[in-house]
Image: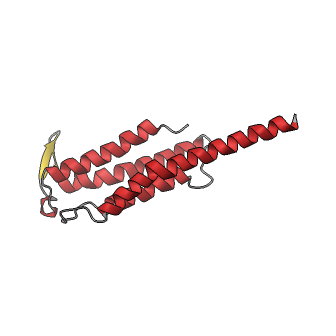
Amino acid sequence: MTDWNLIRDMMAAAIDTCERVEAAGYDEDDRDAVANVGGVDVSIQDFLTSAWTYPENIRYAIIRERHDQADDRAYVPEASRILIAMAQAAAEIIGSHQPKAPAEDDIRKMVTWFDRHAVPGIEKAIANRRRSSSQNRECKV
């Protein structure tokens, strides 16, 4: 079973980090600024590079562990595709200098569509299928 709370924690950590870096006033010219960590000067670029390579490395660790447990994925699940596509779309908003997020109205319509149409439609279709399957089993008995 998917641990959605762990996934929420992962996404929240990434979002919170990006938000705090932006709120700190990070600019490309700041890449070589350093902070002393345990007696070692670490640059902002080092932190930022680690912030995207760490999850990449964790991804490979997850793939290896799933393989070792004979739990390989035969295909990319639809839920994975949704997360990837949404993360990619969200990433395009970052750094925009417009007073309003690009395509904000469309984004809000999409968010509403997920909540009011996609999920209820999927839940309804599954319920219909289950109901139909149980009725078919009862008829055969």
Residue 97 versus residue 2: which sits nearer the camera? 97
Work out whether 51 lies above or below 131: below
Q: Is residue 53 visible?
A: yes
Residue 92 versus residue 48: which sits nearer the camera? 92
What colour-coding does the image apply? secondary structure
Q: Residue at x 31, y 65 (%)?
A: 103
- Relative placement, left or right, of 9 versus 41 is right
Q: Residue at x 45, y 52 (%)?
A: 114
- Relative placement, left or right, of 98 versus 108 is left
Residue 82 versus residue 41: which sits nearer the camera? 82
Residue 39 versus residue 25: which sits nearer the camera? 25
- Relative placement, left or right, of 141 versus 95 is right
Residue 94 appears in which quarter of the rendering? bottom left
Work out whether 125 lies above or below 28: above
Q: Residue at x 66, y 44 (%)?
A: 128
Q: Residue at x 50, y 56 (%)?
A: 81
